[in-house]
Amino acid sequence: MARYTQDSKQRVRDAVDMVDLVSSRTELRRAGANRMTGLCPFHDERTPSFGIDPIEKLYHCFGCQASGDAFTFVMETEGVDFKGALELLADRYGVELEPEAEDPREAERRARRERLVALLERTAAFYERYLWESEEAAKAREYLAGRGLSDEVLREFRIGYAPSAWDRVLLASRRGGFDERELLEAGLAQRSRGTGRAYDRFRERIMFPLDDARGRVLGFGARGMRDNQGPKYLNSPEGELYHKGRQLYGVRLARAHASRAGSVVVCEGYTDVLALHGVGLRNAVGLMGTAMTPEQVAELGRMAGRIELALDADSAGQQAMLRAAEVARGRNLELRVIPLPAGADPAELVAQEGASGIRARMTRSVPFVRFRVEQALEAGGGALAGGGGPAGGGGPGSAGLGSAEERDRVLTELAPIFGGLGPSAMRDELLRMAADRLDLSPALVESLVRSAGAGAAVGSGGAAGGPRGGGGGGFEGRPGEATGGADVISVSDHRTAAPLGRGEQTERMFLALCVALPTEGEEALRRLEPDVHFTSELTRRGAAYLRGRLRNPGEGIGEEDEDLARLVAELSVRAANEPAQGATLAVAALQLELAAVDREIVVARSSGRGDVAELASRRARVKVEVDKAVDRAMAAAGVGEE
């Protein structure tokens, strides 16, 4: 993976038009010389609390605390890492990135990969053109229209068609300067077992380009058009570029919508994703029939904090859900299941029920732990197959639960699920539901599941924590809610940011005033000691970092120090929020001094030190200075004047 020079990064930073960049996500209006405001693109709001500093190229939301620079803005809205954001911005603003000096073998490998990506992109364009322009593809166009897929969606996803001839791509690519070895490495050609001759891998198939979050085509999925054409679905082979377990179909188009919605819908097939996007559910991606992998879960977590599983209601689909929960365990994610009737997939439901019907099903999603309980209670494991309980929508009771042996078997399955749930309303509700289905008392069910293995963690990633589980480390609670008394802030969902304490609010206000008044701010920072006057580890680091950098606070922060970068962005936007005065800065500095003395008095009293009286006298002197400074600030602001 190429690393780029610091000069390249700086040239991209300089080239970014922050107003242009942010305006693509929210409408901005001017609110001062160096500030523009708008509705926050990271959470729903009616009154603008989001602002940018177009000069420093920083943003901050006073509602959800989202903040950062142009790179973090792209990372959050597009769901990419820093390198991806750098490359996207370079493409957008026409900056050529210079890779750092590479090992010759690594440089050769990177150049080879770039050629393969170019070959795949060229081929995707050919397939797309062939679908719409060739007579041979008429049957494919009819099939896609019959699935209810509009031309607009098909073109947006760049759906194509591979001709039946055995060498069309082979010959066209050779004419374009690509050799046979590259076609084989890109997965576009394969060799005959008999003659060893190369021929097109994809023929007479509908083609689904498989691109990454940056929109680079890395491979293809292909659906056969003949009944005797096996296999029905054929993917690119695993290779240097394409790895099935790392792919999510539709991620390029879904990532921004998922970030805005705070959730991502996961289904199985290509047409499921196309159908959902076609009715406005733009945060949908597909697994392409694979069991969910850790790489896919990591990508989903970057997109949103809540994962909604809309997988087929057959045994394979349910096993995929269990696998999803297993690999998601321990991550700050909320996993939910969308109920689907047996034998139906999302694309079929869209065709049958329309947009309103499928949206209604989305609103009936249930926490994964509820799905697990339903699955254990339903005969044959058909928790989502239209049986009893909230997932299926049927009445209580299940076939096959009449004998004591069968009830004991179900209780054994329920034990690890309830063992992972701490005291909560969710646990109580599920216990009562299980008791009703098993025709037992809730107290007896509680006792039996405890004796059958209470305390065991949910084997397939159930709710071991979160606010509903009462513990830490689970993923049934919404990300960012308090668990076990601690404030947890999810990177994926700014709306759950914990409120700041009064002390840290004062510290941040002081630092913002220093940025707004760099000359006076440098002197004020020099007089204070970060370890003494700041209670937050982050504001301590911020105070130390800002010394000597108040005129250009955004420069020099490495992309790895995300927390500090966000703080500096917030301070810069605060600084531009309204006019600042030296008298106000003096008040803030003295307030920090007064708070520091108060903390020292507490320590002295608790440890029995003999200098409490001296500290109290010092506090009185500082308090007098604070009062005088407040009077000067009020006079400077014209408060109290006739």
Image (cartoon, grey):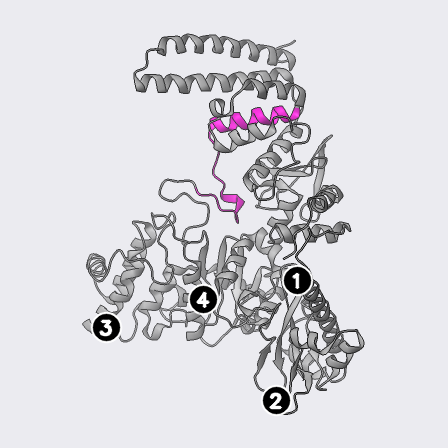
Q: Residues within 10 Å of mark 4 (few under 14, many from 20)?
A: many
* Magenta residues, start to end: 488-516
Closer mark to the observer between disc 1 and disc 4 = 1
Residue 193: mark: 2
Q: From the viewer's perspective, is 428 left or right of 231? A: left
- Give the residue drawn at x 47%, y 43%: 489
| Earlier sequence position, callout 1 versus callout 2 | 1
- Give the residue drawn at x 32%, y 68%: 376
* Outermost residue to the right: 175
Residue 365 makes an appearance in the image:
no
Q: Nearer the viewer, residue 210 or 632?
A: 210
Helix, strand or loop for disc 4:
loop
Residue 170: mark: none
Residue 105: mark: 1
Closer mark to the observer between disc 2 and disc 3 = 2
| Earlier sequence position, callout 3 versus callout 4 | 4
Residue under label 4: 339
Dominant secondary-structure state across the stretch colored magenta: helix
| Earlier sequence position, callout 1 versus callout 4 | 1
| Earlier sequence position, callout 2 versus callout 4 | 2
Q: Is residue 489 above or below residue 139?
A: above
Residue under label 3: 406
Give the image location of residue 498, x and y in percent. 47, 38
Distance CA(mark 2)–CA(mark 3): 54 Å
Distance CA(mark 1)–CA(mark 2): 32 Å
Q: Which kind of residue does numbered mark 2 sit on?
A: Arg
Helix, strand or loop for disc 1:
helix
